[in-house]
Image (cartoon, helix red, strand yellow):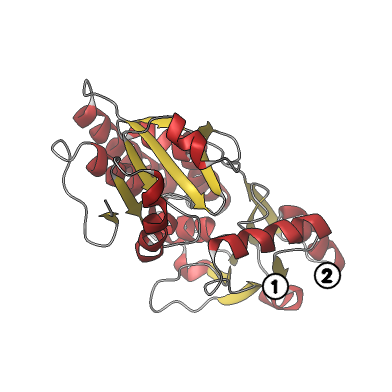
Amino acid sequence: MEGRLTTLRLVSLLPSATEIAYALGLGDDLVGVTFECTVPPGFTPTVVVGGRDTKDLTPSEIDAYVRSAAATGTDLYTLHADALADLRPDLILTQDLCRVCALPAGRVADALDHLGCQSDVLTLDPHTLTDVLESITAVGDRAFAAAAAATLVTTLRSRLSTVAAAVADRPRPRVAVVEWTDPPFGAGHWIPDLVTAAGGTPVVAHPGARSVATSWAAFQEASPDVVIVAPCGYDVVGATAQARTVLPHFPSTPVWAIDADALIVRPGPRLVDGVESLAAILHPDAVPPRPPGQITQVA
């Protein structure tokens, strides 16, 4: 990469950090990832974190599995410690934000101590959209890619400013983002920020905090103008299938499905794509239409 004189062996233990790494041009440095990470064609980093494949489970079955693991103290992810040691990483990107989303940093630190590894560890814990942008800068600083990070963050902020200008002075519809459907969860962490940035008013939301289980009655009482189904771990096809189960609760409200993994739940650069997609739902006459496969109106 132009202007980058130092390389390193990089391991990412969460999908959003992997996306940040590729966006910063660090693909050639990335030697280890998790089984859930999205890797561009031509890259073959070693998988150092595994976990249960839940694609054949229903949302309620996944919720029961996660709750059972939490109750018994069982890890949802498995760190392949020997594989990690063999990679001899210089920098490991991990998190303490959500044990449902990735391996906690404490487990990584314990493994490194056991193995006698001296890797640098950067823990990413963004709770807001601003935090996410700052985490990109943090990765750039630690991975000798500060210039690339500065350029990327400037570009992302510019795109957010473009959306803000396009939706300024327009009515702000009440938006309910359903982050899980069985049981229903209101949106937390940075997701309310995305709605606000897109020109909406988030309801049944927990800005900067963990999402929590609620009820369909609570969603209905919030009187949303738009309902957006964005279940964690699902693309637009899976979100659409779940959105159909939500329709009976909102017979007279527009219901949309969105590619949650790509646009909403992973705290990386593509959250700005998420803002643009949400703006296309809320203010379709003010912003350009989105590419196919990102959003779908279900009713």
Q: Is residue 167 above or below residue 262?
A: above
Q: Residue furthest top?
A: 169
Question: Badge 2: few (under 14), some or many (20 or more) residues near its Cα, within 10 Å?
Answer: few
Q: Indicate the secondary structure of the residue bearing disc 1.
A: helix
Q: Indicate the secondary structure of the residue bearing disc 2.
A: helix
Closest to the observer, 241 or 282: 241
Number of numbered discs on residues: 2
**Amino acid type, mark 1:** Leu
Residue picked out by circle 1 = 84
Q: Is residue 50 above or below residue 275?
A: below
Which quarter of the rendering shows the N terminus? Answer: bottom left
Q: Residue at x 38, y 50 (%)?
A: 248
**Amino acid type, mark 2:** Leu
| The label number, if any, that marks residue 125 in the structure image | none
Q: Residue furthest right?
A: 114
Q: Residue at x 53, y 56 (%)?
A: 17
How far across and down, in percent of the image, does residue 267 sit?
Answer: 49, 48
| The label number, if any, that marks residue 115 in the structure image | 2
How far across and down, in percent of the image, does residue 117 sit?
Answer: 78, 66
The answer to whether residue 276 is left or right of residue 261 is: left
Closest to the observer, 157 or 29: 157
Q: Earlier in the sequence, mark 1 or mark 2?
A: 1
Location of residue 83 (image quadrant): bottom right
How far across and down, in percent of the image, does residue 42 sit?
Answer: 40, 79
The answer to whether the residue labelled 1 contacts the one labelled 2, judged by CB atoms less than 8 Å apart, is: yes
What is the C-alpha distance between the residues marked 1 and 2?
9 Å
Q: Is residue 103 above or below residue 36?
A: above
